[in-house]
Image (spheres, rainbow, N blue to C red):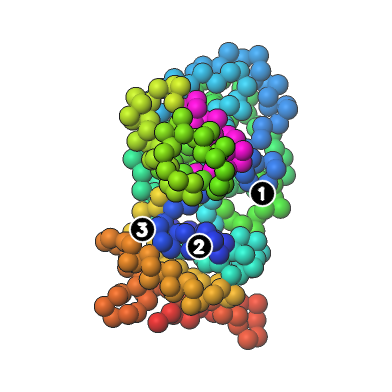
Amino acid sequence: MKLYKYLSTDAAMAFLKEPALRLSQNNSQNDPFEVLPTEIDIDKIINISQKTVKIHGEEFKSHRDINPYLDLYGYVSLSKNKESMPMWGNYATNNKGILVEFEVDEEDPFSIFDIDKTNDNDAYLSDNVIYNRERCYSKTINNFSVEEVNNFSKHYFFSKHESWEHEEEYRFALPFTNCNKVITLGNSNLIKNKLSYLGYKGDLGEEINDLSNLFFLGGGCETSISKWNSVWRNFEAYQVMFLIKIDPSKISKIYLGVNSDIQKMKEVIIEGTNLATGNRGRFYNSFERKFRDVYRCKLDSNQFKLKYEKLT
């Protein structure tokens, strides 16, 4: 299965150096209804005794409201649409960014990520987004068993209004504790001090310790998860971005936007190759000085189509 990711100029340059994609929170999406249960559905479950849900091998007591549980999840959104001009404009900085093509194993879609799963297998969900007019969960909620929690969550993880249908989204949903890269975006000592008690010891702008390592070292303790959960949910205040690393072997092609700075992108690909080991550096052959599986997008002279020219 081929899936695609449109990236802005800045995100593209970071990705080409080290393949990683943002793990997005509910409240970081451009759709304000994203993973937001309706009042009708909340009323259905508010008086039901909700069982604890296992996250990272630990029992997570989420309150009777489902929102704290849903907030633990992050999302990576890809598309089945390779030639969406709206997405080239919106997500790829007016065609200045890039489009990345992934070859995804339908039997094991999460193999696209370079992670060791830190939760139960049923916590990892991926599927096509379903586009609807109605938001509500249609099934009856009885005792909110683990199965019902999963079904309810899937409805909200993979439902969007039909106005987004052109994106043809395929989504990955997984607990944020699988994040294996966190970067700081601010440059204040206040932010650094807020993060220091969580194990961050580097300079601002650098990578924070691998979260999965932190959790393993801490024994997956509830206090550690709770502290990072606070940072996760309040990412804007902490000025951080959570990412998940990609298995480079799953990247099949790279397309440079019509308005992209070709020379700059070439330089970044070469820099990424120099930094890489193994398959990560396959998009540039330093011995032959040739690019591989990298294409430049061009506008068709007569139709609303893109043409692809192989980069040499």
| Magenta stretch prevailing secondary structure | helix
Judge from the rendering whether residue 245 lies leftward or rightward of residue 99; answer left or right.
left
Badge 2, how many Cα within 10 Å: few under 14, some, many 20+?
Answer: many
Earlier residue among tags 2 and 3: 2
The answer to which of 178 and 182 lies nearer the viewer is 182
Q: Secondary structure under badge 1? A: loop
Instruction: Spot the residue most to the bottom.
Output: 301
Badge 1, how many Cα within 10 Å: few under 14, some, many 20+?
Answer: few
At label 2, the amino acid type is: Ala
Instruction: From the top left corner, tell me how far across and down residue 146 is, in percent.
Output: 49, 23
Instruction: Single out the mark in the foreground, 1 or 2.
Output: 2
Measure the alpha-carbon separation of dots 1 and 2: 19 Å
Mark 2 touches mark 3? (CB < 8 Å): no
Magenta stretch encompasses residue 230: yes
Badge 3, how many Cα within 10 Å: few under 14, some, many 20+?
Answer: some
Above or below, comparing residue 35 to residue 308 in the picture: above
Question: Which disc, if any, is residue 248?
Answer: 3
Q: Residue at x 34, y 24 (%)?
A: 219
Q: Residue at x 52, y 54 (%)?
A: 78
> Which residue has dot 1 on it?
30
> Which residue has dot 2 on it?
12
At label 1, the amino acid type is: Asn
